[in-house]
Image (tube, rainbow, N blue to C red):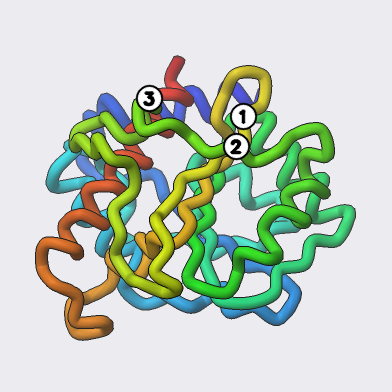
């Protein structure tokens, strides 16, 4: 039933006719001491505005905030998670997140520098049978409304490593995308926060829009 609900949500995003925004995407709140709220003020709201203007979506401009163990995660077809530090899932939280993802939901994890050591072990609690795999540059997520032939854009330097996009693929469907050494979320924030070059801000928003478009097209199938 919940998978059907997600499909209806996705189709509604793609072919919006209602006058008022009805659907939200959400920032994921997690335990462990990490700063899940790192980009709270402007990151997702700016991405939503960009998507509504450039993709023709009708996403509610107000982001949701939802705890990973809450049944309310099923109200959101797209969850965004970021931070610099520790992330710990209880068994119940891991099971709830697995049910959400298996049912058609999607999780985007964005490395905001410091969360990487915790991502893989916690995702193993959710999907013990799966490993994060690096997605090739030919993967459709890089070729939606906007074309990224070289994969993820590099928004912030951090350790100077090349950005990488990893995915969890469950029964042929991408259920989680992990953007590493790119820092898309910081790039979505208001210019005054990081004072990134305008072209980097635009690249971050365009890649974020690709994520949204890919996810809702995938959920609509």
Left or right, 93 with reference to 3: right
Residue at image coords 68%, 66%: 117
Residue at image coords 64%, 41%: 132
Residue at image coords 28%, 72%: 189
Image quadrant assignment for residue 122: bottom right
Residue at mark 2: 133
Left or right, 190 with reference to 73: left
Name the outermost residue toward the top. Answer: 221
Residue at image coords 33%, 41%: 151
Residue 50: horizontal and vertical position, in percent? 19, 53
Front tag of 1 and 3: 1
Image quadrant assignment for residue 205: bottom left
Left or right, 101 with reference to 69: left
Residue at mark 3: 217
Tell which circle, 2 or 1, labels the residue nearer the N-terminal end. 2
Name the outermost residue toward the left. Answer: 198
Quadrant (top left, top right, bottom left, bottom right) of the C terminus: top left
Whether residue 106 can be seen here: no
Left or right, 90 with reference to 163: right
Residue 51: horizontal and vertical position, in percent? 23, 47
Query: Relative to residue 104, is residue 71 depicted above or below?
Result: below
Residue 165: horizontal and vertical position, in percent? 46, 45
- Proximity of marks 2 and 1: CB atoms separated by less than 8 Å: yes
Quadrant (top left, top right, bottom left, bottom right) of the N terminus: top right
**Disc 2 secondary structure class:** strand
Query: Relative to residue 183, is residue 48 depicted above or below?
Result: above
Image quadrant assignment for residue 167: top right
Of residue 170 and residue 161, the one placed in the foreground of this image is: 161
How dense is the environment of label 2, judged by Cα within 10 Å: few (below 14), some, or many (20 and up)? few
């Amino acid at each position: 039933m919940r998978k059907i609900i997600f499909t209806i949500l996705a189709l509604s995003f793609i072919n919006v006719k209602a006058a008022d925004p009805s659907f939200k995407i959400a920032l994921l709140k997690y335990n462990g001491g990490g700063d899940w709220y790192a980009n709270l003020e402007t990151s997702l709201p700016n991405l939503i505005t960009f998507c509504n203007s450039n993709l023709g979506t009708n996403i509610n401009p107000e982001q949701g905030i939802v705890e990973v163990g809450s049944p309310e995660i099923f109200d959101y077809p797209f969850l965004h998670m970021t931070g610099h530090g520790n992330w710990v899932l209880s068994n119940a939280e891991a099971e709830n997140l697995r049910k959400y993802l298996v049912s058609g939901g999607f999780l985007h994890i964005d490395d905001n520098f410091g969360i990487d050591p915790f991502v893989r072990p916690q995702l193993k609690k959710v999907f013990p049978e799966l490993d994060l795999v690096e997605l090739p540059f030919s993967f459709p997520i890089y070729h939606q409304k906007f074309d990224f032939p070289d994969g993820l854009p590099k928004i912030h330097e951090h350790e100077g490593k090349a950005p990488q996009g990893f995915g969890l693929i469950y029964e042929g469907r991408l259920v989680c995308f992990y953007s590493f050494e790119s820092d898309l979320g910081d790039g979505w924030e208001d210019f005054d926060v990081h004072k990134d070059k305008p072209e980097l801000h635009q690249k971050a928003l365009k890649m974020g829009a690709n994520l949204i478009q890919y996810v809702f097209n995938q959920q609509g199938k």
